[in-house]
Amino acid sequence: MPLTKPVSRQLAHTRVVTCHGYQRDDGLLDIEGRIVDTKPYRFKNRDRGGWIEADEALHDMSIRLTINLDLEVVGVDAIIDASPYNYCKEVIDVARNLIGLRIKPGWTQKSKQAMGGIRGCTHLTELLGPVATTAIQTMASEKIRRDRHTTGNRKNVFLDSCHTYAADSPVVKLYWPEHYRGDSES
C-alpha cells in the first residue's frame, strides 16, 4: 500500500543508502554501506570545478566494516568518492577508530564518539546505523545455525528486540513456543 497522496511538491534532494553483507571465506563478515546524495538542479561549487550538475553525486561515500561473529569490528575501510569540499576527504582514516568496538546496544553512541563531530564525517557516521543493522541481519543465519548446532534448539536470536519478536507475541508463540511468555490460553 503506498503512502497517502501528498500535496503538490517539487523534489529537492535524494539520498540513497545501500548496504550489503558478505560472509567471507575466512569466517569473518564484510558489511559495506554507501550513501549517495543528489540534487535535481545544478549549483555552484568551487571545489568541484565550478558546478555540481543536477543528479551528480553531492556526496558519494562508502565504508566497509569487517566483523567477527561476536560483532566486533576487526577491520575498516572508508572512501569519499564525492563531497562538496576537497577537505572532506582528509577524514577517512578516522574510521579506523571503530576497530575494537562491538555492534551491540550503545553502538550508536560509541561509534559517534569514535568518528563523529569535528574529527570525522557526519555522513559516514550516519551510515553506521544502517551498516550495523545489516551486520545483524547478515550474521543472523550463521548465529542461528551455530546456536542450533550447539544447543539443539531453534533459538530466536532476536527475541524481545521488537514488537513482532516480543516474548508474548503470536509470532513467538507459533515459531518459538519454548520462549513464549504470554497467556497460556489459545
Image (cartoon, helix red, strand yellow):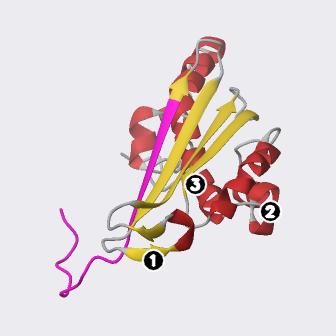
6 vs 22: above or below: below
Point out residue 103 in the picture as x, y percentages from the top left corner: 70, 44
Q: Which residue appears at 16% of the width and 78% of the height?
A: 5
Camera-side mark, 3 or 1: 1
Distance of mark 3 from mark 1, alpha carbons? 26 Å
Residue 25 drawn above or below residue 39: above
Q: Is residue 7 within the magenta segment?
A: yes
Point out the frontmost of discs 2 and 1.
Answer: 1
Residue 143 position (above or below residue 158): above
Residue 157 visible at all = no
> Can you tell which quarter of the image residue 41 is in?
bottom left
Which element is circle 1 on?
strand
Residue 145 horizontal/vertical position (percent): 55, 18
C-alpha separation, residue under disc 2 versus residue under disc 1: 26 Å
Instruction: Tell me: 19 left or right of 78.
Output: left
The span shown in magenta is 1-21
Q: Secondary structure at mark 3?
A: helix
Q: What's the distance in space between the residues labelled 2 and 3, CA to CA?
A: 16 Å
As drawn, the label of residue 127 is 3
Contact? badges 3 and 1 (CB < 8 Å): no
Q: Amino acid at mark 1?
A: Lys
Which tag is nearer the camera, tag 2 or tag 3? 2
The residue identified by callout 1 is 44
Magenta portion: prevailing SS class: loop
The reply, left or right, for residue 31 in relation to residue 110 is left
Q: Give the class, few, some or many, for how many residues have Cα within 10 Å of label 1's Cα (few <14, many ≥20).
A: few
Q: Badge 2 is on which residue?
A: 119
- Secondary structure beneath label 2: helix
User: Relative to the observer, which residue lies in front, 56 or 18?
Assistant: 56
Q: Earlier in the sequence, mark 2 or mark 1?
A: 1
